[in-house]
Image: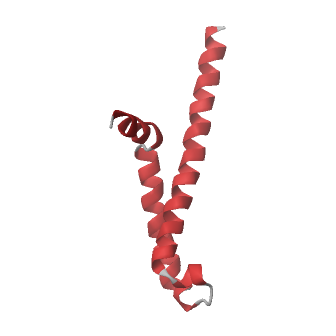
Amino acid sequence: MASTEDFIKKNLNIFHIIGMVLGVGLSMVYWAKSGQFSDNILKKNPYLMALWGILTGYILCDLVFNSQKRKEQENNSQNEA
C-alpha cells in the first residue's frame, strides 16, 4: 500500500489537478459549441471528450511543472558551484 501512495504523491500534485480540471472544462465547452454536431467519434461523445481533456491537461501541466523543476535544479547547481 505504501508504494501506491508514494506513486500518487510523486505523480499527482496540485498543478496536475488544476490542469485536469481546466482540460475537462475546456473540452466540455468545445463539445457544447461544436463537437456534438461533428461526425468524429471522439468529438461526438462527451465522455471521450472529457477523458481527452483530462489527459491533455495532465500532460501539459506535467511538462510545465517538470520544466520549472529542472530550471530550479539548474539554478541551485550553478549557485553551489
Query: Height in image: 31 above or below 78?
Result: below
Residue at 34 percent of width and 33 percent of height: 2
Across and down, in percent, residue 77 comes to 63, 16
Total numbered circles: 0
Residue at 45 percent of width and 67 percent of height: 24
Colour scheme in the image? secondary structure
Quarter where residue 37 is shown: bottom right
Taking the view exactly as shown, the residue that stands out farthest to the front is: 1
Which part of the image, by quadrant, shows the N terminus? top left
Query: Height in image: 58 above or below 47?
Result: above
Residue at 40 percent of width and 45 percent of height: 14
Q: Nearer the viewer, residue 45 or 4?
A: 4
Taking the view exactly as shown, the residue that stands out farthest to the left is: 1
Q: Nearer the viewer, residue 59 or 71?
A: 59
Across and down, in percent, residue 64 comes to 58, 44
Residue at 54 percent of width and 41 percent of height: 65
Across and down, in percent, residue 16 comes to 46, 49
Query: Height in image: 12 above or below 22?
Result: above
Query: Height in image: 57 above or below 8?
Result: below
Across and down, in percent, residue 41 comes to 58, 83
Which part of the image, by quadrant, shows the C terminus? top right
Quarter where residue 75 is shown: top right
Q: Is residue 58 left or right of residue 40?
A: left
Q: Is residue 8 left or right of residue 81?
A: left
Q: Is residue 81 left or right of residue 36?
A: right
Q: Nearer the viewer, residue 68 or 48?
A: 48
Q: Is residue 4 left or right of residue 80?
A: left
